[in-house]
Amino acid sequence: MPSMGHNPSHNPPRSPAHAASHSSMRARSGQEFPSPAKTAENSVHKALMALASRPGYGVTQALAGTIAHSWQVRGVRYFPLFGLNAETTYRLLSTHFPGIGRMMGVAWGELTQPAAFEEAGALNGLVAMLDQHRTVVDEDGTWLAHAVATSCLGEEELWRDMNLPSVTVLHDLLHDFFTILAVRNRSDMPWKKFLQKELAERAERCIRRVGGGDYAHGPGR
């Protein structure tokens, strides 16, 4: 059976003039057209923000950006945020984006962990570190910590992976919710790099404590 896929040989060759015209149009516009994947992500993000209970709230914006990216990359059959179960995810979406689960067709009883989450054990340490440094103990702080951890799997700067308006919004969120940790970033390091450094130092401190304590001589001593 002949393939029903696209056959490039059926297309007429593009003339140099056509290519030049296309390039000049792109140059005159001053911007590249977004990829289909980015367009899909933006559509999900718009849907989340259209249903947002507090669209001007920084946590809502961070959650919307992270969830939109996660759903676009992995699909709605997977948990959108690292480390949250179905009950907690449902409560988060119902609180910040009521109706989005129904709109996106989320099957709550069938959600599974994506492979990217299962292979990212270090994120447990990041969530624990953020949780330990929370300024206010509430659900928003918990959900923000998991959103930060999830977005650290991305390839861009953290504020871009969270689809925030600017790095200043991320800066303010981290200082508001994880003050003691955030103020240590005195040199304005990129946040992913800073969090990685803090995690490494935290692990080193743990090793030193174990090495100098009762476990120094091995088990049973």
Image (spheres, grey):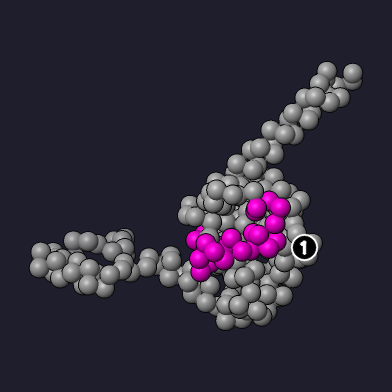
Q: Can residue 18 be seen in this view?
A: yes
Residue positioned 9% across, 68% down in the render: 17
Q: Is residue 3 left or right of residue 38?
A: left
As drawn, the residue found furthest toward the right would be 221
x and y percentages locating residue 147 in the rendered image: 63, 60
Q: In this view, does 82 lie above or below 76?
A: above
Magenta span has 110? no
Toward which corner of the image does residue 94 lie, by quadrant? bottom right
x and y percentages locating residue 203 in the rendered image: 69, 36
Q: In this view, does 33 lie to the left or right of 96?
A: left
181 vs 21, nearest the viewer: 181
184 vs 137, nearest the viewer: 184
The local crowd at label 1, few if under 14, some if 14 to 19, many if 20 or more residues have their Cα within 10 Å, is some
Question: Which residue does the numbered mark 1 point to in the structure image?
Answer: 136
Q: Is residue 27 left or right of residue 154?
A: left
The disc labelled 1 sits on which kind of residue?
Answer: Val
Magenta span has 181? yes
21 vs 13, nearest the viewer: 21
Residue positioned 67% across, 48% down in the render: 126
x and y percentages locating residue 164 in the rendered image: 53, 66
Circle 1 SS class = loop
Q: In this view, does 186 lie above or below 29?
A: above
x and y percentages locating residue 62 in the rendered image: 60, 66
- Magenta-highlighted residues: 160-183
Residue positioned 59% across, 44% down in the render: 196
30 vs 168, nearest the viewer: 168
Q: Is the magenta stretch mostly helix, strand or loop?
A: helix
Residue positioned 15% across, 66% down in the render: 19
